[in-house]
Amino acid sequence: DGKYLALGTNDGYLFITKLIKNFKNQKIKIIRSYKAHLSDIIDLNWSCDSNLIATGSLDTLIYIWSLDKKNPIVKLFGHSSWVRGVNWDPIGRYLTTHSSDKTLVFWKTNNWTSVKILSCKSKK
């Protein structure tokens, strides 16, 4: 919804910031800080309703965050190598993740189970 900006760092931190406007200037204020991953956060994405954030990392994990909680609400294990991308479908029923292990995983968001795993390995 444009109120917040999420930033992932190369040391695994997730920062949630807010733009503060007044007459003289604009400031960015960090409103939440999480030690999120053991390694670089490669990608993050807000859910379509802006209530959740998915993060993917070089540590092979996917975390789902809510601004109301101090810890991730879900920890997903589905890749054997770096998570390179996380994306929500437009309705919010699925999260897709892709990895350097050449797999694409579809997660159902109502129970966080993987419903489909596609292998993208090239055939030689």
Image (cartoon, rainbow, N blue to C red):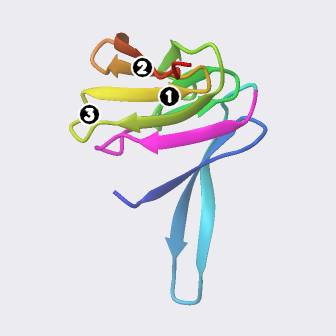
Mark 2 or mark 3, earlier in chain: 3
Whether residue 112 is visible, yes or no, is no
Going by the numbered disc 1, the residue's amino acid type is His
Which contiguous range is marked in magenta?
Answer: 39-53
Judged from the image, the secondary structure of the residue bearing numbered disc 2 is strand
Which quadrant of the figure contains the N terminus?
bottom left
Disc 1 from disc 3: Cα separation: 17 Å
In the picture, the disc for residue 48 is none
Q: Which residue sits furthest left?
A: 91
Judged from the image, the secondary structure of the residue bearing numbered disc 3 is loop
In the picture, measured across the screen, residue 51 lies left or right of residue 58, that is left
According to the image, label 2 marks what residue?
105
- Give the image location of residue 38, x and y in percent: 75, 25
Disc 2 from disc 3: Cα separation: 15 Å
Residue visible at 24% across and 27% down?
A: 93
Would you place residue 74 above or below residue 39 in this image? above
Which quadrant of the figure contains the C terminus?
top right
Please tell me whether residue 74 belongs to the stretch shown in magenta.
no
- Crowdedness near tag 1: few (<14), some (14–19) or many (≥20) residues, C-alpha within 10 Å: many
